[in-house]
Image: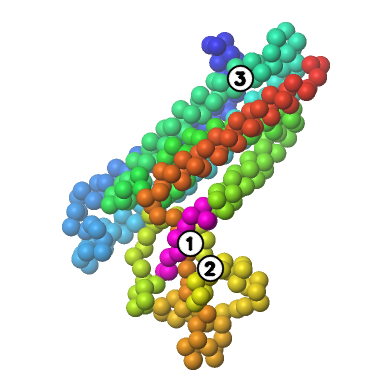
Amino acid sequence: MLTWARLSYRQQRWELWLVAAGVALVAVGMLWFTNELAGLRTASPECFPPDNASTSCQPILNRFYEAGGTAQSLLYAAFIAPFGMGVILGAPIVAREIEGGTAQLAWTLGRSRVTWLLRRIGFIALVVVVLLGVLTVTSEILAATLMPEANLAQDFTYNGQRGWLIVVRGVGALMVGMLVGAVIGRVLPAVLASALVIGLSFTGVSFAMDRWNEGETIARRPMTAEGDPMAFDTSVLTVAYGIETRDGEFLTYEEFFGRGLDFQMNDEQGRMYTSQEDFEEGRFFGYETQLVIPGSRYGEITGREGLVVATLGLVALGATALALRRRRPV
């Protein structure tokens, strides 16, 4: 096992060092901003929460929001990192050995290509889990500092940019990238193709999850009956935006326009009007509405997505083994 680990490291050491340096940079940045944001809160507790702060707190709040905006960009980096690792580390795993001829030699000498594959992927997968585990921890720490009042275990704030789902996505993307490399058998084309395939695969997963979740949502209007905006709530997962008709039917904007309808304006209570005449006479078509999943279901929904991504990874691993078995040894 150690022999295979050393071989894996030698063949991808530059990619591994590049990825490790990127993770280290993002993780250190997250911890630095965590300290900066926590320091501002500690030094000026009278300015938090901002809604109750006096005008003298404005300079402190400006610094806090500026630092927080930059910190959120690091959370976006944590979102992208799993897919980047699938491209940079996943695609060359098998493609480099096929292109260099070492895979064919190993298959000739060895008894099982599947065993060869598992040994080949084991070390890289472990590295991906460790590196993304670091981002999982630091992203949760930063998110908790940005939203100290929130219970992040029941909150969709920064969904996909924090938490253990980062690790699962990384391993899934690694397997998809490896499959592309095994099919193409050349490093550079595999890297380019894997970026497209991984992007399409996880876009498909996201689309499928939205459709799955859509049947379990509740409707929420962004305005109260009195015309006051509802409290800004990022804890929910918004699945769709649209219009709830006066009869209680929900239409996405695509469905609304697909019926040949159009709206000209809306009022302070979020009511939609299809013409100026209807507006003047008070005949509204429906309400602006969002279909959401409450934050209390965060663990269930992310667990469901994690299961789907893990299944995608296992299918990709199985397809890679099948592709290798069909390749000629010479």
The numbered mark at residue 118 is 3
Q: Position of residue 260 (x, y in %)?
A: 66, 77
Residue 105 sits inside the magenta stretch: no
- Of residues 159 and 52, the one nearer the viewer is 159
Residue 217 sits inside the magenta stretch: yes
120 versus 265 height, above or below: above
Q: Position of residue 160 (x, y in %)?
A: 47, 45
Q: Nearer the viewer, mark 1 or mark 3?
A: 1
Left or right: 240, with 88 as reference point: left
273 versus 119 height, above or below: below
Going from N to C along the chain, the mark reached first, 2 or 3, is 3
Residue 77 seen from this side: no
Please rate how many residues cluster around mark 1, counting C-alpha atoms within 10 Å: few if below 14, some from 14 to 19, many from 20: many
Name the residue that disc number 1 marks: 291
The quadrant of the image that shows the N terminus is top right
**Residue interval drawn in magenta:** 213-222
Amino acid type, residue under disc 1 in the picture? Leu
The numbered mark at residue 281 is none
- Of all residues, the one furthest to the left in this rendering is 46
